Amino acid sequence: MNQKEAVTGGVHEGMMTTDWDKLRDKSGEQGTSTTWDDLRGEEYRGGARVEKVVAEQSEASTENEAEEPVAETGLAAQRLAVMEAAKETKRPVSEMEPGAIAQEYLGILRSLGENFSSPEGKSARLVRADGSVAERGYSGDKEFVERIYGLGGMKGEESVEDLDKALNLRMVDNILEVEQRWRDAGEEHAAAQETITKANERLDQLKKEGKSMGLLGKIRTFGARHKEKKELQAKISTAQMTMRRMEMKTKKSNEKLNQSLRAAYSEDYHYGNHQESTEHQNDQKYMEQTSAEYNQRFMHGHEEEIARAIELRKALLKMKHGKLQSERPMIDDRYDSL
C-alpha cells in the first residue's frame, strides 16, 4: 500500500511496532520546539526558584544542615504527584479501581495540555475574533469533565479546578481519541494482512500437496480440499475488505488529528475561525511545517504517557458503554467519544 495514499492529510509520528508505521508521514520528526520537560519545569517549579532551591539544598548538604521542603498546594501539588507517580511502575489498568483510572487519566490530560498555544487552548475559554476572552467555553466542555468524575465515582467539589479548564482538557481528549482510532485501525489492518498471508501460504501448500498426489489420492481428498480452498478464499476476501476500511479509517483519523492539533496549537484558532486564516490556508509550506510542528510538540517525548492515557481511556469507555471495545461497531465515531 502506498504511503501517500494511506496517510493523506496527516502528519503523525509512528509509535507502534507493526508494519503499519510505514503508512505514517514521518515529516513530523523534523519539527523542533521547546521540550515538555522545559515547559513543565517552568510551570511547576518556577524557573529561577528551582535554581535557588537547588543551590540552597547543595549548601545545606555541605554543612550537614536540614532544609525545609518547598510546599506545593492545590492543583499544582496534584500535578506533581501525578508526575512522581509516573516514574513508578504502573499498575495494570485492569487491576485499578474506577476512581484511580479517572484520576490518572485527568492527570495526564492536565499534563499534555499545559503547552497548548492557541488562544482557546491557552485560556480554556471561548476567544472571539477581536481577541477578547469570554467567561465560558463551549457546550459540552464541563459535561465532559463531570462525566469522567462520575465514571470514577468522585465527588463534584473535587472538580472545581478541572471544570475551570474543561475546554483545554477536552482538547487533549480529542487528540487522544483520534490517536486511539489510528492505533486501532493499524492493529486491525495488520491482523487482516496476517490473515491473508497465512491463507495464501495454506493455499500454496494445498496446491503442492495436490500435485504430489496420485489420481486416487486426488479423488479421495477432492471434497475436503475444495471445501478448505473456498474457506481460505472467503477469509482472504473478508480480510481485504477490512484492510480497505482500516485504510479509510486511518485517512480520516489523520485529517481529524490535524484539526485537533490546530485547535490546540494554532494562533489562528478562535471562535468563528476554527481553521487557519485564508493567508495560511493558501500557503502550503506553512501548513506542512505547522502540521509537523504541532504533531512534534504533542507527541515527541510523551510516547509512554500517551500510550498509558489510551489504556486508561479505553477502560473509561468500557465503563461508559458497558461492553467490551471489541464489540464496538467497525466504524462508529460516537462510540469512541467519552
Image: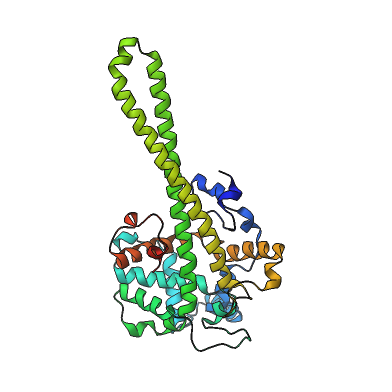
Residue 211 in sight in this render: yes
* Residue at figure coordinates x 51%, y 59% from the top left: 253
Please say if 120 is above or below 312: below
Residue 84, position as x, y percentages in the image? 44, 69
Task: Report the coloring of the rendering.
Answer: rainbow
Please say if 41 is above or below 200: below
Residue 1, position as x, y percentages in the image? 55, 43
Horizontal side of residue 168 vs 316, given as left or right:
right
Viewer-proximal residue among 135 and 4: 4
Residue 59 in sight in this render: no
Count of numbered circles in the view: 0
Please say if 257 is above or below 220: below
Residue 18, position as x, y percentages in the image? 49, 46
Viewer-proximal residue among 263 and 232: 232
Residue 74, position as x, y percentages in the image? 43, 84
Quadrant where the image shows the C terminus: bottom left
* Residue at figure coordinates x 64%, y 56% from the top left: 27
